[in-house]
Image: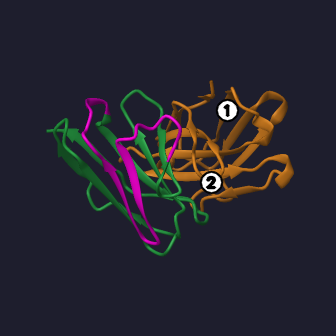
Amino acid sequence: EVQLVETGGGLVQPGKSLKLTCATSGFTFSNAWMDWVRQSPEKQLEWVAQIKDKSNNYATYYAESVKGRFTISRDDSKSSVYLQMNSLKEEDTAIYYCTYGYNLFDYWGQGVMVTVSS
Amino acid sequence: DVQMTQSLSYLAASPGESVSISCKASKSISNYLAWYQQKPGEAYKLLIYSGSTLQSGTPSRFSGSGSGTDFTLTIRSLEPEDFGLYYCQQYYEKPLTFGSGTKLEIK
């Protein structure tokens, strides 16, 4: 059974940092392309970032809204993917989902809430 | 960026009825279109990809159609468990983009 479990969310002030972790199991993580997708309080979904596998040189891609502030990374030995979020803004407030697929999202975690507020 | 438009944000129907949810892309995306379902307390679920291919486990009462810019998700003979939020997503190019969602509620 595929499992994706996100942790690391919480309340943070604007300008601060937060790191999300997604621990996975049930599939061959080392071959997977992993993404982060977020859902705003208005229920709008937004793709955030993607990291490909080793055979694709761990290439990374970002939404324009987070480029330069967020960094996606992975540790194949731990079957985990991460999202380092710096210089957070109030508009980054959302539920963040870890997903697995190849440009579409076959599996989703339950999500973790990130609230950016002073 | 490819803009995805779901014109209906809300749809009410009764069990047993059939409904269609439309999704329009701002440019041709061939058939690189997926549909997702979200139900309260549950993880998002991929229902359909490549515009019309059912993901394993998706009931046959679901169907997808369209190519280019216009797509439709049809649910025949609604079951109580079908009520929830539905989103379309294009994966023709990055940034990967979603429609704004259609909430399907029980009438």
Do callouts 1 and 2 point to residues on the same chain?
yes
Looking at the rendering, the stretch of residues picked out in magenta corresponds to B54-81
Left or right: A71, with B65 as reference point? right
Q: Which residue is mark 1?
A: A21
Amino acid type indicated by mark 2: Asn
- Residue at position x 41%, y 37% in the image: B59
Query: Could you tell which of marks 1 and 2 lies nearer the N-terminus?
Result: 1
**Which of A117/B34 is in front?**
B34
**Residue B89 part of the magenta-drawn span:** no
Looking at the rendered structure, which numbered label has been put on residue A65?
Answer: none
Amino acid type indicated by mark 1: Thr
Q: Which chain is green?
A: B
Q: Residue B62, located in which quarter of the rendered image? A: top left
Q: Which chain is orange?
A: A
Compute the Cα span from label 1 to label 2.
20 Å
Name the chain under label 2: A
Q: Which residue is mark 2?
A: A103
Q: Mark 2: which secondary structure? A: loop
Q: Are marks 1 and 2 in contact (CB under 8 Å)?
A: no
Q: Mark 1: which secondary structure? A: strand
- Residue at position x 82%, y 54% in the image: A56
